[in-house]
Image (spheres, rainbow, N blue to C red):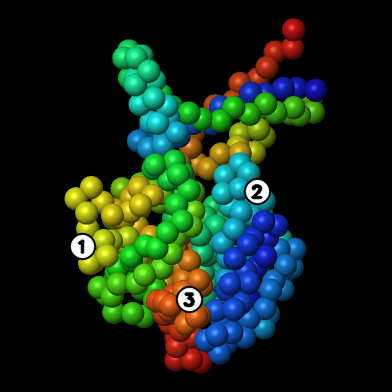
Amino acid sequence: MRFGVVIFPGSNCEQDVIHAAHILGHEADFVWHGDTDLSGFDAIVLPGGFSYGDYIRCGAVARFSPVMAEVVRFAERGGPVIGICNGFQILTEAHLLPGALLRNRGLKFICRQATLRVEESACQWMDAAPGTLLRIPINHNEGNYICDPDTLARMEASGQIVLRYCESDGSRAEDGSAPNGALDDIAGICNERGNVFGLMPHPERVVDPAVGITDGAVVFTSIARRLAEVG
Amino acid sequence: MARFQIFVTYKKGIFDPPGATAERALVSLGYDEVSSVKIGKFIQLEVADGTPQERVAEMCGKLLANPVIEDFRIEPVEEA
């Protein structure tokens, strides 16, 4: 399959995504933020970074890039879209995913390994069994997920919570396990249809066996399997 | 030219990490009377004469504030 990786001014994880896709035997190419043609791509990736300097709010300006109107159309047609870190922030600003990402509770930029628990969800980008633990790094300043209680209940009911932060043994700390203070330990969510996925952790960084952990590969292999099934 | 001042603050119930940190810092500096600090954004906008406030509100809803988490208040600035 062929991934399209969108580059905004200030994106900085696009090479990692391309590398991860190649390692897994897929094609991947860059899409410039001014482009409006996504034909030829099977899935779209909004990578991490600091699009437009994170000015106003993270993702607030990138949302209005010419390419985003096309990404919205692609998603509405059922095309798979993933937003990683800053990409997740852009997806919430574009209202492709509910809620918002606030500054980390402790005010510090956090860069470290996180343990994530796979939840039962409708996400097309995650076919690992519920309860599976994944070690994937986080690297952000605004990863403190928030939404209103009604939205949380609705997401819970329709299987939109895909990944939660947890302790290394899969348990939940008494005061929560999200290093950034995220509501209900939420690390990744999808839309109701399951084709749009946003997460703060960086799966693309743990795909190449050279780095020692390959827990991020499942994100890319899940969508590839899904697309192969539906043809 | 017309001027507007825009105040962007978190909605009620949204945790404000910088505000909470400033609150704790003030209390630890001995300002025991402090019970709440909220930190938001202040925006000064200059627009063409006659621009209606509704249009400024549209700018706020679209870009300057995120209605999911933030409220905004617009005040026209009277020229002296």
User: Label 2: chain?
Assistant: A
Gap between marks 1 and 3, in whole Å? 26 Å
The x and y percentages for residue A112 are: 42, 59
Q: Which residue is mark 3?
A: A211
Eyeballing the image, is A127 above or below A190?
below
The x and y percentages for residue A159 are: 32, 68
Q: Earlier in the sequence, mark 1 or mark 2?
A: 2
Give the mark toward the camera: 1 or 3: 3
Mark 3 falls on what kind of element? Answer: helix
Mark 1 falls on what kind of element? Answer: loop
Q: Which residue is mark 2?
A: A53
Quadrant position of residue A212: bottom left
Q: Badge 1 local density, few (<14 within 10 Å), some, or many (20+)?
A: few
User: Label 1: chain?
Assistant: A
Horizontal side of residue A121 vs B55, given as left or right: left
Gap between marks 1 and 2, in whole Å? 36 Å
Q: Is residue A193 visible?
A: no
Q: State the residue in front, B49 or B25.
A: B25
The x and y percentages for residue A51 are: 64, 54
User: Label 3: chain?
Assistant: A
Quadrant position of residue A13: bottom right
Q: Which residue is mark 1?
A: A171
